Every structure is written in structure tokens, then in C-alpha cells.
Image (cartoon, helix red, strand yellow):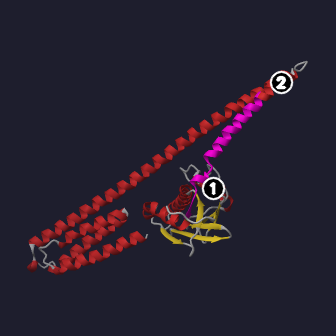
């Protein structure tokens, strides 16, 4: 939001300067064509609505400037000056139209890219689930067969204890195989100590907000970040914790965007107490009902029409793997607060 405000401040200042220059110079000099550059500046950080407002403002200032010079008085009629005004208006309108098309095209491409990413993630999850089911089903199925065989050997008269023991031993090996598969999956989700380093959580939050700045600007989210007066150092996998923040912040952005309200405030607070770092991410969206507050961290639970329900589940896994926690609560008067707690570092920070 700060970037957007600075762009509009620059636009207003430059527009006033161009208007004054256009008003005091001869109508034969097409100063107003300079408004085109302002449209292009707004295009780089504004929405289609912003560009339209900027274009209409520039056209209005161009007409007012010409009126101030001639008063549309036939005795002061200047054909060349009027031609220049029409050329300027045409240039401003054309650039405004093309800029809106560019922004809309970029937005469509971004949505298509996000949809493709969700589709690929869904396919990857299905492939992973199929692979895991196959790897675990095989030893469990073999164990079931061996147990059934042992039962048959024991039911014989007389019972064949030798064959029954062999079948039971085989079933034991099958269950050990299944256990090794599960342990391998756990290792995939465990944060290695070699991936850990010490960093300031405020720096990571700033970096994360910069990564999400386009989405924040597009959805018109007002962001307020208030950090602890002292450095809050965390010892962990920087990439994983950033992914945790991205998941939670994206959820807050989407909740406020789908609500349709203009009250879209995202507040991030950090603090340190009792050996842990606290990160609060507050939104002013529609909120979550009390019975669903705990469920939102369950795998495949989602309230979105096209959601996969794994973002917050992954976030909880990341927090737990660092010895921390994550919980949801109600914001007042409306919205949700996600509180993340991570152990403070006992080591000094390291240069990146």
C-alpha cells in the first residue's frame, strides 16, 4: 500500500506541474502529451481501475488547460492548438486503453499460472498418495496372507507348528518392511539440523511481504507490520518458515478478497516472551466459526470451492517440526488471528 500511495503522490505532483506548464505556454505547444508518461507510471503499480481514473483525470486536465487558454472563444480560435489538444486526448485515451489491456492480460496470466500450479500440485498429491498406498499395501497384504496361512497350519489336526512359526516370522518381516516405509516418509518431512540457521523473524516477514506485494496490491490489502523493539531471533529452516508465513498470509488475503468488503486490513505483530517468538497474523475477513477453528489445520479440510486443504496442514507440520505451534482464534469485530510460536534461538545470528 505504501508503494501505491507513493505512486499516486508522484502522479498528482507531476500532473499539477504539467497542467501549470500547459496553461502558461502557448496552445500551439502540445505539453499535455506528457500526461502519457504518467499513465505508464500508474500502469506499473496500479490496477485497471487506477489506470482508468488516471486517464480520465489527464483528459480532464488537458481540456481545462485548453479552455483556460482560449475560453473556447471563436475570436481566439486556434486551429493548430485545437488539433494538438485532440492529438493529446487521443494519445492519452489510447495509452490508457492499452495499459488497461496489459494489466488485465497480466492478471489473467497470473490466474492461469496459479490454476496450473494448483492442478500440478493436485496431480503430485495424487501420485504421491498412489505411491504411498502401493508401498505400504504390499507388505501389509503379504503379512495378512502369512497370518492367514499360520492360522490354517494351527487349525490342522495335528497342528503344524513349524510351518505356522515360519508364516508368523514372514508376517513379522512384512510388518518391519511397512514400518521402514513409514519411517522413510517421516524422514522426508523432518527438518534436518544442517538446514537450520539463525535469522531475525522481522527480516523474514519483510522479505515475505515483498514476495507477495503484487498480490497485496492487486487485492487492495492494507498491510500494517509492527515488530518487537528487540531483535527476535529464530533457529530453524528459513525456507520452510517462510513457506509457513506465505501459506498463512495468502489465506488471509483470499479470505478478505472473497468477502467483498472494502475493510481489508492485514496486521502482523511480533513479540518474544518466555523463550518463544510470537507471530500474530490478523485479518478482517469474514472469520471462521468456532467449531471449525481447529479443523482448518487438518489435512484436506477446506472451506474454499477449489481449495486442496493442505496449505495450513503443511504450515502446522512446519511449526511442529521446529518445536513450535500454530493456532487460530477470532479477531474483533470480524476476522481471524493466526498465532505462530517458535522457539527463540540460543545461538547468535549468522550473516546470510
Residue that label 2 marks: 164
In the rendered structure, which segment of residues is drawn in magenta? 170-199
Q: Nearer the viewer, residue 279 or 166?
A: 166
Element type where label 1 sits in the image: helix
Element type where label 2 sits in the image: helix
Q: Main secondary structure of the magenta part?
A: helix
The stretch drawn in magenta includes residue 174:
yes
Q: Residue drawn 61% across and 51% down?
A: 192
Q: Is residue 321 left or right of residue 113?
A: right
Residue 106 drawn above or below residue 87: above
Q: Position of residue 48 (x, y in %)?
A: 36, 62
Instruction: Please tell me in which quadrant of the rendered image residue 231 appears.
Output: bottom right
Give the numbered dot on residue 199: none
Q: Residue drawn 31% across and 69% down?
A: 54
Q: Nearer the viewer, residue 129 or 36?
A: 129
Residue that label 1 marks: 316
Q: Local crowd at mark 2 within 10 Å, few (<14), some, or many (≥20)?
A: many
Amino acid at each position: 500500500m505504501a508503494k501505491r500511495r507513493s505512486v499516486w503522490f508522484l502522479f498528482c505532483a507531476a500532473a499539477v506541474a504539467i497542467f501549470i506548464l500547459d496553461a502558461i505556454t502557448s496552445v500551439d505547444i502540445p505539453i499535455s502529451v506528457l500526461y502519457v508518461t504518467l499513465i505508464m507510471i500508474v500502469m506499473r503499480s496500479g490496477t485497471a481501475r487506477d489506470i482508468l481514473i488516471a486517464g480520465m483525470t489527464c483528459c480532464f486536465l488537458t481540456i481545462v488547460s485548453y479552455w483556460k487558454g482560449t475560453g473556447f472563444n471563436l475570436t481566439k480560435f486556434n486551429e493548430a492548438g485545437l488539433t494538438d489538444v485532440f492529438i493529446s486526448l487521443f494519445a492519452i485515451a489510447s495509452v490508457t486503453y492499452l495499459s488497461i489491456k496489459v494489466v488485465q492480460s497480466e492478471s489473467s496470466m497470473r490466474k492461469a499460472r496459479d490454476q496450473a500450479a494448483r492442478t500440478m500440485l493436485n496431480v503430485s498429491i495424487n501420485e504421491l498418495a498412489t505411491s504411498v498406498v502401493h508401498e505400504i499395501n504390499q507388505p501389509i497384504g503379504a503379512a495378512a496372507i502369512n497370518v492367514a496361512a499360520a492360522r490354517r497350519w494351527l487349525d490342522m489336526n495335528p497342528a503344524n507348528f513349524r510351518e505356522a512359526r515360519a508364516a508368523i516370522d514372514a508376517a513379522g518381516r512384512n510388518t518391519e518392511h511397512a514400518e521402514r516405509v513409514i519411517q522413510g516418509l517421516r524422514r522426508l518431512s523432518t527438518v534436518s539440523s544442517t538446514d537450520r540457521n539463525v535469522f531475525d523473524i522481522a527480516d523474514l516477514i519483510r522479505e515475505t511481504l515483498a514476495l507477495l506485494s503484487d498480490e497485496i496490491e492487486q487485492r487492495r490489502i492494507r498491510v500494517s507490520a509492527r515488530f518487537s523493539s528487540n531483535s527476535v531471533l529464530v533457529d530453524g529452516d528459513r525456507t520452510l518458515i517462510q513457506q509457513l508465513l506465505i501459506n498463512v498470509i495468502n489465506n488471509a488475503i483470499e479470505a478478505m478478497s472473497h468477502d467483498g468488503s472494502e475493510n481489508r486490513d492485514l496486521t502482523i505483530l511480533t513479540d518474544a516472551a518466555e523463550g518463544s517468538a510470537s507471530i500474530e497474523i490478523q485479518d478482517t475477513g469474514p472469520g471462521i466459526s468456532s467449531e471449525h477453528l481447529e479443523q482448518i489445520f487438518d489435512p484436506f479440510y477446506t472451506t474454499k470451492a477449489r481449495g486442496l486443504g493442505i496449505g495450513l496442514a503443511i504450515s502446522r507440520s512446519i511449526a511442529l517440526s521446529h518445536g513450535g505451534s500454530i493456532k487460530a482464534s477470532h479477531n474483533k469485530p470480524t476476522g481471524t488471528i493466526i498465532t505462530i510460536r517458535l522457539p527463540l534461538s540460543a545461538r547468535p545470528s549468522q550473516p546470510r
